Amino acid sequence: MIKLTFCLRRQPHLTRADFQTYWRDIHGPIVERHRDALRFIAYHQIHTIDDPIGTALAEIRKAPPAYDGVAEMIWASRADLDQAMNSAEGRTAGRELLADERRFIDLAQSPIWLGEIPVSLTAAQP
């Protein structure tokens, strides 16, 4: 399985609440609309919460400021990802998603990468 991980920082003009509302209610449905073209099997939004335990954990570790959220998109195989990225429908979907992301994500401050979920661990995935 291949997983895209995207650690999101919001545009400076947005509050975290406004960012998360837009991400959930506007962007999320756009992603889901392109599920077939992009050939992914799962899409998750993990919204950061303000919590004293999280704050304490970050302070103990001297961690940098938290992201506003993390997006995950999972493909069953590298072949599925390649087919999505090389199809006209997949490229059109990617352009639409990027245009929308520019409205609420500080892209220059939001790392994105691909990783592999080892087969031995896939049974443990939610």
Image: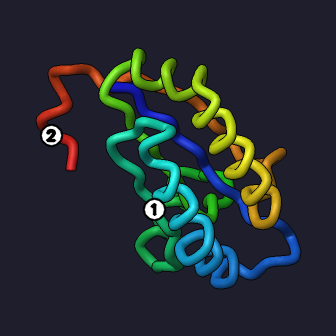
Which residue lies most toward the front here?
88
Which residue appears at 67% of the width and 78% of the height? Answer: 16
Front-lying residue, 33 or 120: 33
Residue 49: percent from the left, percent from the top? 50, 75
The N terminus sits in image quarter: top left
Splitting the image into 4 quarters, where does residue 3 fall? top left
Query: Is 123 located above or below residue 66 in the figure?
Result: above
Residue 94: percent from the left, percent from the top? 66, 41
Q: Which mark is residue 46?
A: 1
Q: CA separation, marks 2 and 1?
A: 18 Å
Residue 72: percent from the left, percent from the top? 46, 47
Label 2–label 1 contact, CB within 8 A: no
Mark sitting earlier along the chain (2/1): 1
Which residue appears at 21% of the width and 50% of the height? Answer: 126
Which residue appears at 44% of the width and 48% of the height? Answer: 35
Front-lying residue, 91 or 123: 91
**Circle 2 Cα neighbour tier, 10 Å, few/some/many (<14 / 14–19 / ≥20):** few
Q: Is residue 43 left or right of residue 90?
A: left
Which residue lies most toward the right here?
13
Query: Is 11 located above or below residue 115 in the figure?
Result: below
Front-lying residue, 86 or 4: 86
Q: Which mark is residue 56?
A: none
Q: Is residue 70 left or right of residue 123?
A: right
The kind of secondary structure element at disc 1 is strand
The kind of secondary structure element at disc 2 is helix
| Location of mark 2 (residue) | 124
Splitting the image into 4 quarters, where does residue 23 fall? bottom right
Residue 115: percent from the left, percent from the top? 46, 25
Kind of residue at badge 1? Ile
